[in-house]
């Protein structure tokens, strides 16, 4: 079986122990038999969708792709050792006193993993991806811009670490 993954998922594929794969930003039938890609992506071949918007999602994605069950939970957790905020938010923390409005599904996963309450009516902060800047100009609350997929590292640990770092300032 020929596996193809996207650049955004490659690090997780490697950590899960998959050795033989190709990388293509837009996988197709000519690239392989099975695609491993972000859950939002659509392809015309069999695919395993993964989510990488929170520490828990990264953890679960590694487990999902560990086809031989060769990694135990502690080994997977050790992948977070160089990313202290990502490791901290592996276990959802309670920040229920922080109410936010969120302008993106991928950011909802991130803020929920930090224990923030998503509320479109009663909120103190507006969290939005950089590509939706025009959509938030009318907001009267504090705006928190988060880099989107195209403007951050391909490494999911570095990506989520940067987002947690920005959002930590609200605590």
Image: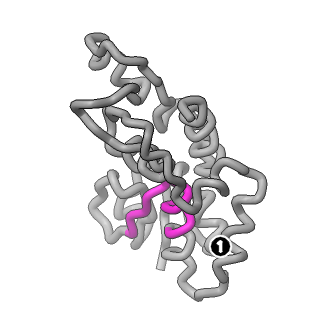
Residue at the spot x=68%, y=68% of the render?
Answer: 77
- Magenta stretch: includes residue 49: yes
Of residue 142 and residue 161, the one placed in the foreground of this image is: 142
For the residue carrying disc 1, how many other residues have a C-alpha within 10 Å: few (<14), some (14-19), or many (20+)?
A: few
Q: x%, y% of residue 140?
A: 31, 13
Q: x%, y% of residue 7?
A: 54, 50
Measured along the vertical axis of the image, is residue 40 above or below residue 118? below
Q: x%, y% of residue 152?
A: 57, 35
Count of marks overlaid on the render: 1
**The quadrant where residue 16 appears:** bottom right
Q: x%, y% of residue 94?
A: 50, 52
Quadrant housing the C terminus: top right
Measured along the vertical axis of the image, is residue 150 above or below residue 85? above
The residue sitting at the left extreme is 121
Which residue range is magenta in the image? Answer: 48-60
Q: Is residue 114 left or right of residue 26?
A: right
Measured along the vertical axis of the image, is residue 90 above or below residue 26? below
């Amino acid at each position: 079986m020929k596996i193809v993954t996207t650049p955004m998922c490659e690090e997780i594929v490697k950590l899960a122990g998959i050795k033989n794969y190709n990388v293509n930003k837009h996988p197709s039938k000519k690239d392989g038999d099975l695609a491993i890609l972000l859950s939002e992506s659509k392809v015309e071949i069999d695919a395993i969708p993964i989510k990488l918007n929170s520490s828990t999602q990264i953890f679960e994605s590694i487990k999902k792709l560990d086809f031989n069950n060769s990694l135990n939970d502690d080994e997977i957790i050790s992948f977070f050792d160089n990313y202290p905020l990502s490791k901290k938010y592996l276990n959802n923390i309670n920040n229920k006193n922080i109410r936010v409005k969120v302008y993106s599904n991928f950011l909802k996963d991130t803020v929920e993993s930090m224990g923030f309450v998503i509320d479109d009516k009663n909120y103190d902060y507006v969290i939005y991806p950089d590509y939706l800047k025009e959509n938030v100009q009318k907001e009267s609350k504090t705006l928190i811009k988060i880099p989107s997929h195209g403007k951050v590292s391909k490494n999911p640990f570095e990506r989520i670490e940067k987002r947690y770092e920005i959002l930590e300032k609200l605590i």
